[in-house]
Amino acid sequence: MPIDAPGAGAPSETLLRVSNLKKHFPIRGGLFGQPAVAVKAIDDISFDIGRGEVVGLVGESGSGKTTVGRTILRLTEPTSGQILFDGQDIAALTPQQMRAQRKRMQIVFQDPDASLNPRETIRQAIGRALRLHNIGTRGEREGRIVDLLEQVGLSGDYIDRYPHEFSGGQRQRIGIARALAVEPEFIVADEPVSALDVSVQAQVINLMEDLTQRLNLTMLFIAHDLAVVEHISNRVIVMYLGKIMEIAPSSTLYAAPRHPYTRALMSAVPRPDPTFKRQRVLLQGDIPSPINPPSGCVFRSRCPVAGPECAGNVPALEQIGEGHFSACIKNHEFA
Amino acid sequence: MIDPNTDSQPAPTMQDTALLEVRGLTTCFKTGFDGREINAVEDVSFSVAPGETLAIVGESGSGKSVTSLSVMGLLPPQTGRIASGSIKFRGRELTTLNNVAMRSLRGNAMSMIFQEPMTSFNPVYTIGHQIAEVIVLHQKLGYRAALSKAVDMLELVGIPEPQRRIDNFPHQMSGGMRQRAMIAMALSCEPDLLIADEPTTALDVTIQAQVLELLKDLQARMGMAMIFITHDLGVVAEVADRVCVMYAGQIVETAPVRDIFAAPRMPYTAALLGSMPRLGAGRDRLVPIPGHVPPLSRLPKGCRFQGRCGFAQPSCAAGEPRLEPIAEDHQVRCFRAGEPDLIERSLS
């Protein structure tokens, strides 16, 4: 597969280029505990993200989307492959070199309760991020934290409060403020709104949209909710069982999904309209085990249009339109 | 599910045909160190006709789950109690029923499924054993006969190789499969009423679609009524005949599903619909509801939604609005419910 292919259609300069990335988690078994088999959480994926772009990453549980986010930031060590961030291979950096890069790339987690220490005030939590990266003097830091709180729509007066004094939505705002504290260029947002109620979710989505524009942030937005991803992303990557099934600009993907998996996924989303007549592609069965994925196309065991030919080769991600790639040997039968 | 022809039939009047009739239900919980009681659910009234699906929709803390636990008699005995109101199932009052009578009703005439099937299965017994146990208890069948019925039930819910699967322990099944097994267990005694509390929330969308199809299909075949509790308006549109919208412990609007989506009259319902991102809507800006749900211990005086409502006026803080009919089978809890085009005007 041409390494640069999936990046076509990305605007301007490439900030992140992921090439042939693999992450296999060995499962120890047998008498002497040798790694017998491995979970192929990410199996040879490549994509680019342009500076200032928001790329959505969707997939069901077990698709490997969270592992992609963590591996890009080297919170999980890749098994093989290249992660070029602004031209530098992240995967090859020493821990010291990596620490300097961390300032440029941050993560927002799904569960703000689990990522904020309940015994720390906001001043301590955000202040530590600033201190570790040697940003500002002690006096300057206070002003910076107040600024950050106000940027995410909270009052600066809250600086000495503890996480439990906030609602879920407010805690997620604090998680975002902490990620922004070191002025990163790139943010991985891993299901940042899934734990929030609908009415509050919209507040946080709007906030993230405003911030990415105002601060010219680049973001990988990981989520299982297709409507949320459509809303926030310029481009979308669809993953299934460790592999990329389809990549396309948001507008193209949602108007004309090509890969059978993307189509099935979209048709499964319940619409808030009781008069909506759906044409549902009901997938049978569950996502297979990533320890022993189907040969050839990993989706073929659930694919409504799979034939015997799908078991042979792993379909490559093939360009089928402007910035639009799909990994299916029947790409041209379902245009 | 939503058959256009049903509109022409007269809506059943609730009093004489209801399977379940809840009137003025108030359920309170002890909180904190001082043991002070707060009302998790206040003055909730609704009814469910045989074969009907009622969706109860609301955000966290709205009281939707407490409502269902009250109906099932499953409130935590140390902390929760029904303070007032009546719950009638086929005309029989449940709030005064003793534990033995309630237990024989549960699992038999009415049954419940939960969000996380792991919590309703015992991890150390096989799936088959646990389903058979329910059948033996309620249907006076021998264990062997019950086990063979358990196989039938697993087959009914679409579990492949049910004969082999009855020997599985819960952890040996996938999330979607366990949810099916729980549905099999809940339906094994052919209940008249199934309460489904966020049954698809923990599932992936493709599995959710399977489970929703299954529930609708089984409901049609067995003719049971269903109370479907969810926070997801998309799921509501898909399964419900009628909808109760709850907010901060109260029902704020109740109407047939089409009216809820086409002509919501409580500002909260309209705002909730407006705040959800919709598939195919592109990148239009979302309209969030400002603020957050007030904690039950610190409710505002008057209407509970006033602090977040775009239509609030000073009088909203004066008294508590009541749930009042604005049309046949459509009730709204809002002082401004008498202004029919209030919400429409704001959208145009």
Image (spheres, rainbow, N blue to C red):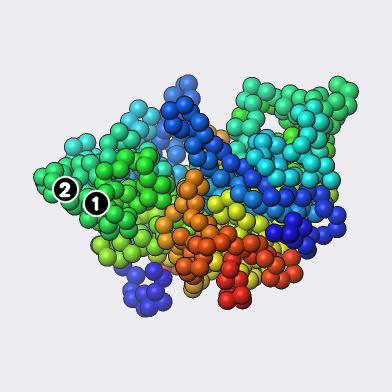
* Amino acid type assigned to the residue bearing label 2 in the image: Ala
| Relative image position of residue A152 (x, y in whole percent) | 75, 41
Instruction: Write down the chain letter for disc 2.
Output: B
Q: Nearer the viewer, mark 1 or mark 2?
A: 1
Q: Is residue A315 visible?
A: yes
Indicate which disc, 1 or 2, sits on the residue closer to the N terminus.
2
Crowd rating for badge 2 (residues with CA inside 10 Å; few <14, some 14–19, many 20+): many
Identified at 71% across, 71% down, the residue is A321
Identified at 69% across, 50% down, the residue is A20
Q: Which residue is mark 1?
A: B163
Q: Is residue B347 above or below residue A198?
A: below
Q: Is residue A119 above or below residue B1?
A: above
The picture quadrant where one finds residue B80 is top left
Comparing A214 with A159, the one in front is A214
Q: Which residue is mark 2?
A: B146
- The N terminus of chain B, quarter of image: bottom left
- The C terminus of chain B, quarter of image: bottom right
| Relative image position of residue A139 (x, y in whole percent) | 88, 23
Q: Left or right: B52 with respect to B294? A: left
Q: CA distance from mark 1 to mark 2?
A: 13 Å
Identified at 60% across, 33% down, the residue is A113
